[in-house]
Amino acid sequence: MSVFSLPRALSIARKEVRHVRRDPFTLAMAVGVPVLLVVFFGYVLDFDVRDIRLAVVDRDRTPASRALADAFTASGHFRPHGPPDVPAARLLEEGRVKAALFIEPGFGADVDRAVPARAQIVIDGADNQTAGVIAGYLDGVATVAARRLGADPPGDLLRTRFLFNNELNSRWFVVTGLFVVVMGVLSILMTALTVAREWETGSMELLLATPVRPLEMILGKLAPYLGLCLAGTGLIYAAARVLFHVPFRGGLLFFVASTVLFLCCTLAQGLLISVLTRQQQLAMQFSNLTGLLPVLLLSGFTFPVESMPAFFRVLTWFLPARHYMELCRGIILKGAGPLALARPVLWLAALAAGLITLASVKFKRDLEP
């Protein structure tokens, strides 16, 4: 018997296709669930902070001080809040406002004399992420206020320009990351159950009676799910473009090739779990442990990889999700090409080859666990 036979691998693939066609749960999980998750999380996960409750303490009560307070409201990010008879410090302590603006007497006089006029804004730092976003809004508000007061905008010598996402739309950042999170978790789960299900139902014994090599078995089972996951990715792409208006600046063929490499990694990882566990319940638990948590926490979806401790930065190099996250955001938002993204492509190719080989090596033809 030859080392590898394509007809035997295709026969396993045809058998798996017939099984998938009779299993509506698998079809729904591969095609319908990704779109629902992307639509749901695309609207729910929003890193932009809006409607910030602001307490305004105007002790100057001049046109200049009112113009400064109006600049915060006109920005669209801040909303005056809090009764005037309640101290601003108390409102901050109780969490009823996120920031407080203090304008002391003499602010308007300083503006009229064309000398630096000062005001103080205090931000609730209990939520450091929200506090950082609010602090980032202050430069724009200060610029608008200075123009309204006829003064030179602060930092006029420094001009800032944002590339690839001029409006700093966080949904573009989130939705491109959901390509990785949704398909990464679902693809591992789908194949993690396939071989384990064969062992539990007893159909694996029939397969073992045929002259099928482990590599043929692994590739034959991987191919149909690769097609399903590609279809799910296509629907996610359509939802991103139509519902969230995410731009696509890169090459479509390059994106598809990168997606195939990533799915080969995750599908092979699921098959490896299924081969080792031989039990669907145990395979599902390992899938969640090795798929969901690393994808969410170590891929760069939520936290930048560069800010992680050294050990975890090294660990992320062996996670396919980290490299596909870089590819998705590089191709979709930046329009980067193969030369610029050669490193994550090579890592994905190496991880895919390694996981497929490991799953083939660990595949046992004997009935004993």
Image: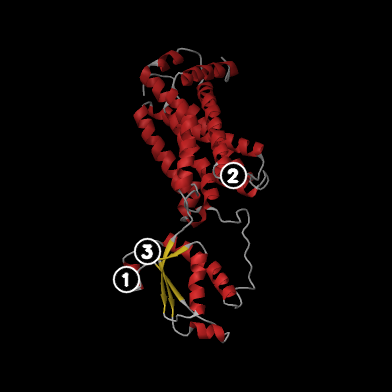
- Residue 118, image x, y percentages: 49, 80
How far separated are the C-alphas under marks 2 and 3? 34 Å
| Residue occupying image coordinates x 63% and y 44% | 248
Judge by depth and name the residue closer to the eye, 245 or 336.
Answer: 245
How far separated are the C-alphas under marks 1 and 3? 15 Å
Residue 320 visible (yes or no): no
| Residue at which label 2 appears | 327
Tell me the mark number nearer the camera, choosing from 1 and 3: 1
Q: Earlier in the sequence, mark 1 or mark 2?
A: 1
Tally of numbered tags? 3
Element carrying mark 1: helix
- Residue 225, image x, y percentages: 51, 27
| Residue at which label 3 appears | 126
| Residue at which label 1 appears | 90
How far separated are the C-alphas under marks 1 and 2? 47 Å
The relative height of residue 113 versus residue 174 in the rendered view (above or below) is: below
